[in-house]
Every structure is written in C-alpha cells, then in structure tokens.
Image: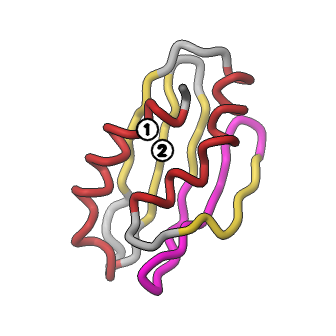
Amino acid sequence: AMPDPITVDIPHKLDRATARSRLEGGIGKVADMIPGGAVTDHRWEGDTVFFTVEGMGQRVSSRMDVGDDKVHAVIDLPPMLALFANKIRDKLTREGPKLLK
C-alpha cells in the first residue's frame, strides 16, 4: 500500500501571481528535503505546480496549489521513503515560508 501523502499548508500574505512567481523561483529548494534530491521536471496548470523530485534512487511526485492565503503542498512519498515522512513534513513546514520570501 502507498503511504498517505504528506500535506502541508504554507500561509502567505501575497497575491496569487506573486506567490506563483516566488514558488517558481524557489521550487529547486524543495528538493533539499530529500538527501541528494533534485527537481527533475515541473509544470504549471493554472495556480498549481506539479513537480518531481528525484533522490536516493526514488521519484517523488509533488504538487503545490497556490491559494489566496496559503500554498497547499501535497507530496506523494514512495514506500521506500516513508520513513522520512515526518522529517520531510517538518522541514517543509519550517522552510516552506522561505520559498515565498
């Protein structure tokens, strides 16, 4: 069975366009959550960015939905990385706001 995805809400006080452009600039930093990770592809569909992080021989599908007052991040960890779920959630909660600075 696949582990439950990690979901994190990152609050912001920006307009959506600004939040989108800051995420666009900061998306590579999300890869730092996984040891040796790199963002290998990303695409926008409206206010949602879909991206893949590859690290430790694993592919992690992720998306971030830009809302009016928060960014909702959903990270689908493969079973091999489920042990890291709490670490990744904590790091995203802590570091996520910096992506929007």
Q: Residue 73 at what x, y percent from top left?
A: 48, 44
Residue that label 1 marks: 96
Q: Earlier in the sequence, mark 2 or mark 1?
A: 2
Badge count: 2
Residue 92 left/right relative to 86: right
Residue that label 2 marks: 73
Foreground pick, 17 / 79? 17
Span highlighted in magenta in the image: 45-62
Q: Residue 42 at what x, y percent from top left?
A: 71, 58
What residue do we see at 45% from left, 57% from top? 75
Q: Residue 61 at what x, y percent from top left?
A: 54, 66
Quadrant assignment for the N terminus: bottom left
Residue 96 left/right relative to 67: left
**Amino acid type assigned to the residue bearing label 2 in the image:** Ala
- Asked whether 38 falls inside the magenta stretch, the response is no
Residue 1 left/right relative to 28: left
**Amino acid type assigned to the residue bearing label 1 in the image:** Gly
What residue do we see at 36% from left, 75% from top? 2
Q: Quadrant of residue 100?
A: top right
- Considering only vertical position in the picture, is 1 above or below 31? below
Q: Please report contact status of discs 2 and 1: CB closer than 8 Å, yes or no.
A: yes
Spatial CA distance of label 2 from label 1 is 9 Å
Badge 1: residue crowd in 10 Å (few <14, some 14–19, many ≥20): many
- Asked whether 48 falls inside the magenta stretch, the response is yes
Badge 2: residue crowd in 10 Å (few <14, some 14–19, many ≥20): many
